Amino acid sequence: MGFFLTLVLLVVTLGVAWRYLGSYMAAVFDGRVHFLGFVERPIYRLLGTRPEQEQTWKRYAGALIIFSAVSLAITYAILRWQGSLPLNPQHLGAVGSALSFNTAVSFVTNTNWQNYGGETTMSYFSQMGALTVQQFVTPAVGIAAAMVLVRGLSRKSFSTVGNFWVDVTRCMFYVLLPIAFVTGIVFVADGAVETLAGTATIHDVLNGVTQTIARGPIGFMESIKQLGTNGGGFLNANSATPFENPTGFTNFLSIFLLLCIPFALTYTFGKMVGSVRHGAALLAAMVLLFGVWVGFTSAAEHHNNPAVAIAGVHSTVGNMEGKEVRFGDTSTALFGVASTQTSTGSANGAYDSFTPVGGMGLLTGMMIGEVTPGGTGSGLYTMLVYAIIAVFIGGLMIGRTPEYLGKKIQAREVKLAGLAALIMPITVLIVTAVAVSVAAGRAGPLAGLSPHGFTEILYGLTSQGNNNGSAFGGLTGNTPFYNVIGAITMLLGRFAIMIPCLALGGALAEKNVVPESLGTFRTDNGMFVGLVVGVILIIGGLTFFPAISLGPVVEQLSQLKVF
Amino acid sequence: MLIHLRRSLVLAIICLVVFGFLYGLAGTGVAQVLFPHQANGSLTANGSTLVGQNWSSPRWFHGRPDDTGPYAASTSTGNAGGDNPLKANGFSGGSGATNLGPHSLTLVKNTRTLIKYWHDLGVDPTVDLVTTSGSGYDPDISVLDATVQIPMVARATGLRASQLRTLIATDAHAAEFGFLGSSYVNVLQLNEGLAALEK
């Protein structure tokens, strides 16, 4: 009953965000919002650019790549020089070179995969100056890339797609900063820590225990961590720790924050292309898949953990191994699904200890491409890629040149869309094959050479290939092998998908609009929603089916029970 | 190309200043003024209500077994543990779960050890009391988890079971707004209440 009410509240609040945050973001990217002009204008002056100075997709992509490379270098440098930088009350030394590289790539690609325990590795300077900064920058870069594709669909015979510097700046200042600051206060009010005073050591006279408690500027990192679908927490156990996620309310707020922008962007898209119905069609496909995954994953977690049941405890409480009492089983599962189907990857429990079906829910949520609703920006542009593949297939069925929003989808567009859709599965399957083939890769999983051990490896690389960042924590990732192969996977998962999408946006912007006729294949009705859902499931499901069979499916069948 | 590089450097430095430091410092300032207790870690004289501790004596209500029995500092190879959140069980990563999978034989063995641990204390354990948490220092237990420990605490302290039941009922927190998350009892608050009762 409580879980049902939680879902109702989530639907209502996200519905409001979809409508109003969605139209606000459309106004921001159309340049109709100006209340922070006094901040914005000096920045453009320093950058030497103006909002009217638009770029072709190639210049836009060049700016995006170089800006990301510079961000990567600065993040890496801060981690390596941590020992000599201020705001380091625990006197933590430099982060190792392989780990710094992996972490810098991870935060610059919006992955936030963490091969380290935050409280014992990162100084406050690194947490704020290296990591939190990227939690603002990377969602803005992702949304900017999505805007290129949206403008490609809304513009007629244009050679330019927008100004990268302006899009990123506006997104950070008008969208991310205000929401993150206000909700940061809410996190702290409920119990999240926010101090620069270092650790606290307290002796408990009742039981004679002395504790050294890690603290830091956590609350305000927490809000942007969720809002930007980043997921990289201050502490090792992420949102499971009470200092990051103190109550059932902050848990709900986290779920809302990490879903609100990705869902609302479909409204922004609809508004900008002049047909909210088209945005609603994409939203419907997202909600349909998201709902199914929430259903079976939380049902699975409401059952006892098989190992605990074998040991002799039978109860109706659900799988509490690796979960926190204040959240309970189903709310933890809901958080997990929301976190893996966006590119957030934050965790309020141990995903590794989920039941086989529950863990498979999280794993397959990433495998279907993180489009339901996906990451900030990345969800929308990947979803549009699937929509273009869907109209292509629809066009083949009715024997007409496919069109989407009046734009003819021709050989070049289909090739780019196919490339963008297939890079992730190809990358993930190849690196997983490499990892299980070499000794350094096989040494990683806690569960050893078993179906669950294979799932730990597959999950880790799927997570990095999708820029998710969640983990089956049993995998020991801080080794040279996993640091390097993970970094390569994350870079491909981010930029090898983003660049074809920018090219697609550029190609579409150049096209004129074909007038709608009776024979035009409708792309804003239930039939199209079904087609998009089918495309997502076929691309994700068929490419990964053999791999899933070797992991969670074997694990579940060896237990001979459906749940 | 060069113009991209120059603009990238400028924007990266602006972001470093604004989102790295102004944002965090302004946030810390607001937090310290408006909610100093929470911002500093919800500390009491005996610890933090948000960080679980090891209550090994039967005189006290126990929390989740994050550093008890098989998960205690000397025996564990995993990542659980709650006494020292900075160095739980000698594992240097800080907070974290055991990450034992749903078919892990270690998890079966550890759970059996914990069931015996509770039976030796005269308690019939619930699921929460034989499983470890996600953070490695879950500060809370459910009302049922506290209730099953009443015989143990009553025997060790000499307090009446009815007094302990009342104590648990007063300390129980409902789910937020009645439905977000689960209801729970904070173990530190419960034991501080228990200490006051004994005076």
Image (spheres, rainbow, N blue to C red):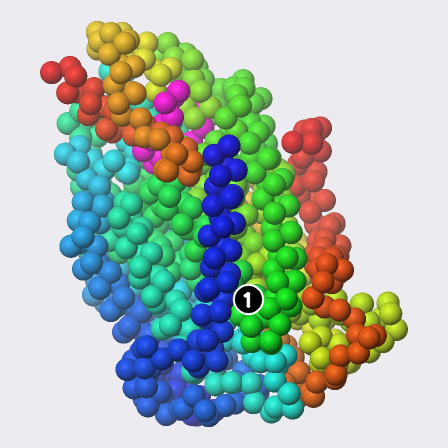
Q: Residue at x 49, y 73 (%)?
A: A26
* Residue B135, magenta (yes or no): yes
Q: Nearer the viewer, residue A271 or A240?
A: A271
Tell me if I can see residue A52 in this picture: yes
B121 sits to left or right of A228: left
Q: Is A319 rendered above or below residue A420?
A: above
Kind of residue indicated by mark 1: Tyr
Tell me if I can see residue A112 in this picture: no
> Circle 1 is placed at which residue position?
A267
Magenta highlight range = B130-145
Residue A477: percent from left, percent from top: 49, 53
* Residue A525, magenta (yes or no): no
Q: Residue farthest to the right?
A: A399
What is the number of callouts on the image? Answer: 1
Q: Nearer the viewer, residue A167 or A363?
A: A167
Q: Residue at x 71, y 79 (%)?
A: A406
Residue A101: percent from left, percent from top: 44, 66
Q: Residue at x 31, y 50 (%)?
A: A187
The quarter holding residue A175 reads bottom left
The quarter holding residue B98 reads top left
Disc 1 secondary structure class: helix
Q: Chain of mark 1?
A: A
B181 sits to left or right of A407: left
Q: Residue at x 27, y 50 (%)?
A: A188
